[in-house]
Amino acid sequence: MIASVHGKLIHKDSSAVVVECGGVGLRLMVTKNTLYQLPETGAEVFLYTHLAVKEDALDLYGFFEEDELQAFRLITSVNGVGAKIGIAILSEFTASRLTVYIASGDAKALTAASGVGLKLAQRIVLELKDKIGSLSSEEEGIDLQAVGNATINSNTKEAVAALVALGYSQSEASLAIGRLDGTLSTEELIKQALKSLARGL
């Protein structure tokens, strides 16, 4: 199993890179998020990797951050989600943002990724919601407990529903409400959540 590669970045395009290690050039498929974080060609680079073994090929996937590698492995464990879909999802979302969408049950948000229809997105949420703790959310400082707190009582549920009715996504609403004191009234929860959302928090 190839766990990582470290060498000179000699080529990169919109979906793959080539890293020279010990005189051998290894081609790795990468997400757009990883691609954006890579240095210019000619520089040293370190990537976490996943090796996919097929009957007729060995495909190597590279990730700038270990969180993204873990997310890729978790997503591709879902029935019907292959490596191509996994790369597409992690090209659209960071691992931490994906965590929020899954934890809050926002399947619709996942359909923004190429090749992901609503049924597949719902399957991803259903199968991974209980496993989501294995995805790190440190990158964006997301509190998964706060996301879960948004379903504690009827006040928070009503507040989340109100924000969704105002046009916010389920995940945005859950995250905003989840940060607040669940004992507040529905009206106060909505008011404070709108303030935080307006500030982009």
Image (cartoon, rainbow, N blue to C red):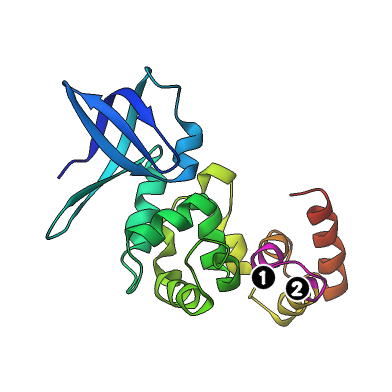
157 w.r.t. 191: above or below: below
Task: State which tag comes first along the sequence, 1 or 2.
Answer: 2
Work out which quarter of the rendered image holds the N terminus and state it.
Answer: top left
Mark 1 residue element: helix
The residue lying toward the viewer, choosing from 131 and 113, is: 113
Q: Residue at x 56, y 64 (%)?
A: 101
**Magenta part of the chain:** 163-174
Determine which residue is flagged by label 2.
Answer: 164
**Is label 1 in contact with label 2 (beta carbons under 8 Å)?**
yes
Image quadrant where residue 65 sits:
top left
* Residue shown at 45% from the left, 71% from the top: 129
Residue sitting at x 53%, y 43%:
139
The answer to if 170 sits in the magenta stretch is: yes
Disc assigned to residue 170? 1
Residue 78 or 117: which is nearer the viewer? 117
Answer yes or no: is residue 134 visible: no
Q: Is residue 85 left or right of residue 116?
A: left
Q: Residue at x 64, y 75 (%)?
A: 152
Residue sitting nearer the eye, 71 or 143: 71
Q: Is residue 22 above or below residue 200?
A: above
Residue 9 place in picture, x, y as percent: 34, 24
> What type is the residue that disc 2 sits on?
Val
The location of residue 185, given as percent across then percent down, is 83, 73
Q: Position of residue 99 (x, y in %)?
A: 51, 59
Q: Residues within 10 Å of mark 2 (few under 14, many from 20)?
A: some
Distance Cα–Cα, label 1 vs label 2: 6 Å
Check disc 1 and give the amino acid type: Gln
Task: Mark yes or no: residue 193 visible.
Answer: yes
Q: Provide residue 62's location: percent of width, then percent of height.
A: 33, 41
Say which mark, if any, is on residue 113. none
Q: Is residue 19 left or right of residue 98?
A: left
The answer to whether 8 is drawn above or below residue 48 in the figure is above
